[in-house]
Image (cartoon, rainbow, N blue to C red):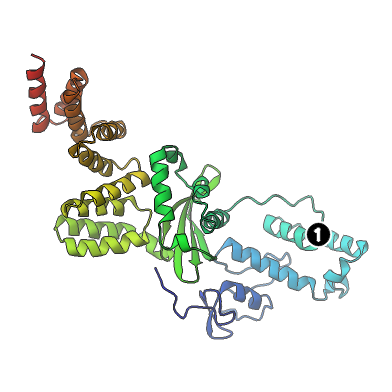
Amino acid sequence: MNILKNDRCKICKVKRGNRFCLRIGKDICWQCCNEKRIDFKCSDTCRYSLQKTETFEYKTNTDSKKEYEDLLKKSIERWMNLSQEIFQNKIPNEMLKTEEGKKEIEDFLVQLNISNPVLLNLFNVIFKLDNPKAISKTETHEDIAQKYLDKIIEQDWQGTMKFLYRNQQYENQEYRKNYLKRLSTNNILKKLTDYELISSALSEDRKQALVYLDINRKYDLTLRLGLDEKSWKIDSKIFGKPEICNGENDAIKQVAMLLAKKDFSKAFTLIKKYSAIFVDSADFQYYWGLYYTFTHNNKKLKEHFWNAVEIDPTFVEAKYNLAYVCHSEGDIERAKQLYYEIIEISPEDIKSLNNLSSILIDEGEYKQAKQFLQKCVKIDKDFEIAKKNLKRLEELVK
């Protein structure tokens, strides 16, 4: 998470300066870069310099689809305001004022045989042409990221849910309520007023994406997305630059090691740091739960184990710890429900099978309890707690 420093574009002074411009010797934003490079005066040594082609599909580098579209739009707008040799030095913008001129431009574009749908649609919009080749624009990962953030700006928390990758789990009202609470109480997101897309990237199989944004001109935000059949969905939010995404697993290992060593002071510092970055990480919520288990704060541990379960309902360890706490506090129905969910996910989880059997014995459900306990012993013949519960059950049914 980066607080605003002297990172603004040295031309517009507003947007994030995310690349070094050889022409002015300073950092500029991609929007101002597009304004400059369309004159083809940038040095070939710059990776963002344009190379002319006959079909407007310039050879260059862009960091996002939005940047690429903006570059094409700016270059076309510049082209249409300059005299063109192909039209006997007439200006395309002036030609559009007559049907004859418009027809001449349309014929020229047909001869180019442009296949790029983005370019085709731009020509149709800018020149107001009736080109049958134009196609409807499919929503990209960048479009979905921006729509998601628009809902957050509106504080339409419910409206964000349709953009989530795992939104089926939120048919569960408790999960839904917890998600909305986490989102609406995030200190940065609840104050979100504006954002600027900086870059995006697709995985090699094109089924995952990262979209990097500057929010409130103050913080870095990376949205991780997944392709759900044919639609892009939000998988998680990371308050940081895209390059830190690969560091999540190492951070998890660091925290796990500190908790194993019972170095709670250092563990607290790291969990606080990383959970503020990886806000949708079930792992860091789980480690908060473990931290508060070791430091005996039942209210906090339940909150964080519940967060972990809401984020990832298949997270067996988090669900078991939550069930165990509920069981210990006498919230039997909740514990029972969670144990059943666990054994549906992991049928050989002997701890859950045993604890559920204990509840069933107390409720007089001896037959089901016996089946579960026998399964425990079959899986692990040395599981002493299950053996003791079997013995207790035998005494009760004599």
Which residue does the image show at 17% across and 60% down from the upper left?
Answer: 264
Q: Is residue 142 above or below residue 54?
A: above
Which residue does the image show at 59% across and 61% down from the upper left?
Answer: 65
Which residue does the image show at 18% across and 64% down from the upper left?
Answer: 265
- Residue 241 appears at what percent x and percent y? 43, 66
Which residue does the image show at 11% across and 21% down from the upper left?
Answer: 393
- Residue 214 appears at what percent x and percent y? 49, 68
Q: Nearer the viewer, residue 258 or 94?
A: 258
Q: Is residue 19 above or below residue 260?
A: below
Q: How many marks?
A: 1
In the rendered image, is residue 49 in sight? no
Residue beneath label 1, please?
128
Q: Where, by quadrant of the figure, is residue 250 drawn?
A: bottom left
Q: Amino acid at mark 1?
A: Lys
In the rendered image, is residue 335 in sight? yes
- Residue 356 appears at what percent x and percent y? 21, 30
- Residue 95 appears at what percent x and percent y? 88, 68
Q: Residues within 10 Å of mark 1 (few under 14, many from 20)?
A: few
Q: Where, by quadrant of the figure, is residue 147 drawn?
A: bottom right
For this orientation, the residue located farthest to the top is 398
Q: Is residue 161 above or below residue 67?
A: above
